[in-house]
Image (cartoon, grey):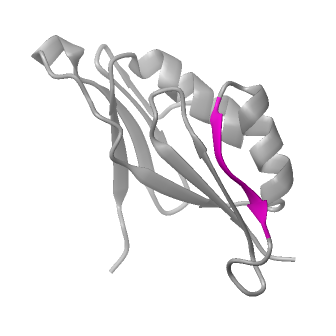
Amino acid sequence: MRIAAVILETTDAARLAAFYRTAFDLPEPSHVLPDHIGFTLENTYLGFEQVVARGEVPRPAVSVWFRVADAAAAFERLIALGATAEMAPDATCSPGETLAVVRDPDGNRIGLLSTP
């Protein structure tokens, strides 16, 4: 079994999709609809669903973890793009790994994981 898709609900799909695209060098979106933007990645579909049209207000409840080459560098890049720091890069909390956590512009948690 594997996760096929992660869909983040937002009040501004274009803004949040652009943040993730820039932050993680994602390819062009594979799906662009008035209320949905999605990226087909190697093994997972990452989508951004605009819910304000349905009268819903999303609450940050998602934590998405990305394996990156350098968690500290990715952490700094995301902060520069407007993310909020939650946990600075730490190489002591998980043996053999560096972990860091930020919040995206909607408040969702983004975990960063790298190994030396």
- Give the mark count: 0
Q: Position of residue 96 (x, y in %)?
A: 78, 85
Q: Position of residue 28 (x, y in %)?
A: 59, 31
Q: Which residues are magenta?
A: 83-90
Q: Where, quadrant-wise, is the N terminus in this rendering?
A: bottom left
Q: Name the residue at 26% across, 29% down.
A: 58
User: Is 44 in front, or is 11?
Assistant: 11
Residue 40 visible in the shown view: no
In the picture, residue 50 is in which quadrant?
A: top left
Q: Is residue 89 magenta?
A: yes
Residue 98 visible in the shown view: yes
Side of 96 where 52 appears, left or right? left
Q: Name the residue at 77% across, 78% down.
A: 92
Q: Name the residue at 80% across, 37% down.
A: 77
Side of 20 where 13 appears, left or right? left
Q: Name the residue at 37% across, 51% down.
A: 6
Q: Position of residue 38 (x, y in %)?
A: 42, 35
Q: Where, quadrant-wise, is the C terminus in this rendering?
A: bottom right
